[in-house]
Amino acid sequence: MLDLTALDPDFVEARFPMIHSTLKTYGIDLAKEPVLVLPAAHYCMGGVRTDRWARTSLPGLFAAGEVACTGVHGANRLASNSLLEGLVFGGRCGEAMIEADAEMPGDAPPIPDPAPCPQTAEWMEEKRALLTDLMWRRVGIERCGSTLAEALTKLRELRAATDTIAPDRDWLQLRNMALTGELIAAFALLREESRGAHFRTDFTETDDEHWRRHQVFTLDELGKTV
């Protein structure tokens, strides 16, 4: 339990305005009663590999910030690292994009018309809830090989079911979530050790001899590896 009742109520409200007001909407007064605390997966390491100017291997695609894997963070991503990535690589990304834009041909090819959305809103909501539950229960704070493999199979099935062009924003978001979940599960299954925020109950020790390195795969390579 998080207990701030020993502090002055005015101080608690002024010091933690966001969480104080949020808890109020649920009928909980942070200054007057203890609050139940549960573990949560805050973030994951990794991301889209870039060079020092935020360029990826795909021409015209740039990545900066927490989506990118620049090498300035290791097994644990710290808040100061995020600031570094935003300020340094965000600025470099902008410069590189301006340079790339000047070198690109004038007219971009036309974007094809998207296909009709193949599923109902109810179907997408059901699959989104399934994905959320799957990632929390199988790919969350504690992981093991058997449950990761189970999650990976289901995530690949979901990605295959959403791997079409559709005009609906929710559909695109679900497809991207399924792909991201698949990548997280696949790399977690492949890395047979515990390091930083990645904890395997079946491989509890850190193994520098085999795993003190980055793992970089294309989607095709990853599918053949795991």
Image (cartoon, helix red, strand yellow):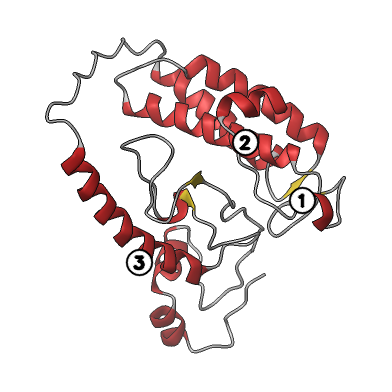
Please name the residue that numbered disc 3 is placed on: 87
The mark that comes first in sequence, 3 or 1, is 3
Closer-to-camera residue (132/209): 209
Q: Residue at x 20, y 20 (%)?
A: 109
Q: Amino acid at mark 3?
A: Leu
> Of circles 2 and 3, which is in front?
3
Q: x, y percentage for residue 92? A: 32, 59
Q: Are marks 3 and 1 in contact (CB under 8 Å)?
A: no
Please name the residue that numbered disc 1 is placed on: 211
Element at badge 1? helix
10 Å crowding of disc 3: few (<14), some (14-19), many (20+): some
Q: Residue at x 30, y 61 (%)?
A: 91
Residue 192 appears in which quarter of the rendering? top right
Q: Amino acid at mark 2?
A: Asp
Q: Are marks 2 and 3 in contact (CB under 8 Å)?
A: no
> Is residue 9 in view from this perspective?
yes
Q: Are marks 2 and 1 in contact (CB under 8 Å)?
A: no
**In the picture provided, is 216 more to the left or to the right than 81?**
right
Q: x, y percentage for residue 135? A: 63, 38
10 Å crowding of disc 1: few (<14), some (14-19), many (20+): some
Rounded to the nearest angstrom, the CA distance separating label 2 from label 3 is: 34 Å
> Is residue 29 in view from this perspective?
no
**In the picture provided, is 62 more to the left or to the right than 23?**
left
Please name the residue that numbered disc 2 is placed on: 133
**In the picture provided, is 190 more to the left or to the right than 202?**
left
> In the picture shown, does residue 200 fall above or below 185?
below
Closer-to-camera residue (123/159): 159
The mark that comes first in sequence, 2 or 1, is 2
